[in-house]
Image: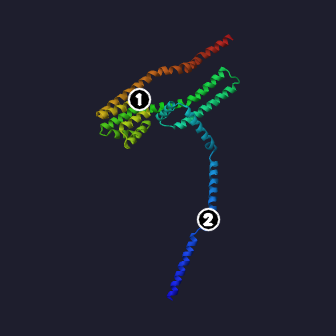
Amino acid sequence: MLVALIALLIFGTVLLLFMGLRSAAPQPSVLATLGARMDALRRDSDIMEEEGDLSIPFSERILLPAMMGMTRFATSLMPSSMMANVERQLVIAGSPMTISTFATMWVGCVGTFVVLGGFILIAGGSFGIQQIGMTGAVVALGFWAPTMWLKSKVKARQKLVLKALPDALDLVTTSVEAGLGLDAALARVADKTAGPLSVELSQALREIAMGRLRRDALTDMGERTGVEDLISFIMAVVQAEQLGVGIAQVLRIQSEQMRTRRRQRAEKAAHEAPIKMMFPLVFFIFPAFLVVILGPGMIRIVETLG
């Protein structure tokens, strides 16, 4: 009985081992099925890629790459100094777009105005001096329009920084005299105010918190804004830090100077106002007065003589 049981166990073990090895060995039918499934998945992925490419709009598939290629070609033709100047102005303007986006807009604007100039030249019917001059003026306007727009953005942002600077310095001076450190006072100004100056202060404080030297962070902030008053204030703070002068006294002097400069700018604008008002008075208001005052008399004179 024991011998039969042992023989039965040996037979079952061998049978199970044989069946396991047989199931582990890949069969030709299984390999063929796996290959067919792989081919089907590959075909489905190719179809999905083609459908995905076709689902992208025509402007993103064709027009945008063509425009980017034209932009790279145009930027390669432009002088490096000109591109560096444009990039610096974009930084001063608050980085409204990247240099590649601005170049794309530039190329598109120039192309549009060139087409418009050609249309004006063809619509004139003749290639006279007047048509050629108008075409050249339109093309020049298309070339300079993006630059003028960028300069207007730079001036507007610098004006906002210059307007907020005296009040910000007063708050920094008050905070430092109350016992805060310079970084904490600048952080308070960045939290309590809004505008480009607050954004630049926040960026400089983040750089300082990441381990950058204060003078380097503040100097870069002055270069990013391009405002002379802010640059002079930063230079005074850096020199006071290097020479060991009390920062509160330096801030007090700088704050008084900023208020004096603001008053001088207001007086200058007030003195320039009459001269600036002369042109609209001469070209728009005085002719209307003459028409209103002399119009009835001229009508009566014409009726009498007629």
- Which amino acid is tagged 1? Glu
At mark 2, the secondary structure is helix
Disc nearest the viewer among 1 and 2: 2
Q: Is residue 89 left or right of residue 208?
A: right
- Which amino acid is tagged 2? Leu
* Residue 5 placement (x, y as % from top left): 51, 85
Seen from the viewer's position, the closer of residues 273 and 211 is: 211
Its colouring scheme is rainbow
* Residue 97 placement (x, y as % from top left): 52, 38
Q: Relative to 231, does residue 287 appear above or below in the rendering?
A: above
Disc nearer the start of the sequence (1/2): 2
Q: Relative to 202, does residue 280 appear above or below in the rendering?
A: above
Residues at marks 1 and 2, CA–CA distance in whole angstroms: 76 Å
Q: Is residue 46 something that shows in the picture?
A: yes
At mark 1, the secondary structure is helix
Q: Residue at x 50, y 84 (%)?
A: 6
Q: Is residue 219 left or right of residue 177?
A: right
Q: Residue at x 56, y 30 (%)?
A: 145
Which residue is outermost to the top? 305
Q: Relative to 35, does residue 130 appear above or below in the rendering?
A: above
Seen from the viewer's position, the closer of residues 184 and 148 is: 148
Q: Relative to 163, does residue 16 appear above or below in the rendering?
A: below
* Residue 210 placement (x, y as % from top left): 38, 44
- Where does label 1 land, which residue? 228
Q: Is residue 152 something that shows in the picture?
A: no
Seen from the viewer's position, the closer of residues 45 and 126 is: 45
- Quadrant of the rendering where the C terminus is positioned: top right
Quarter holding residue 57: top right
> Which label number is shown at residue 31?
2
Number of on-image labels: 2
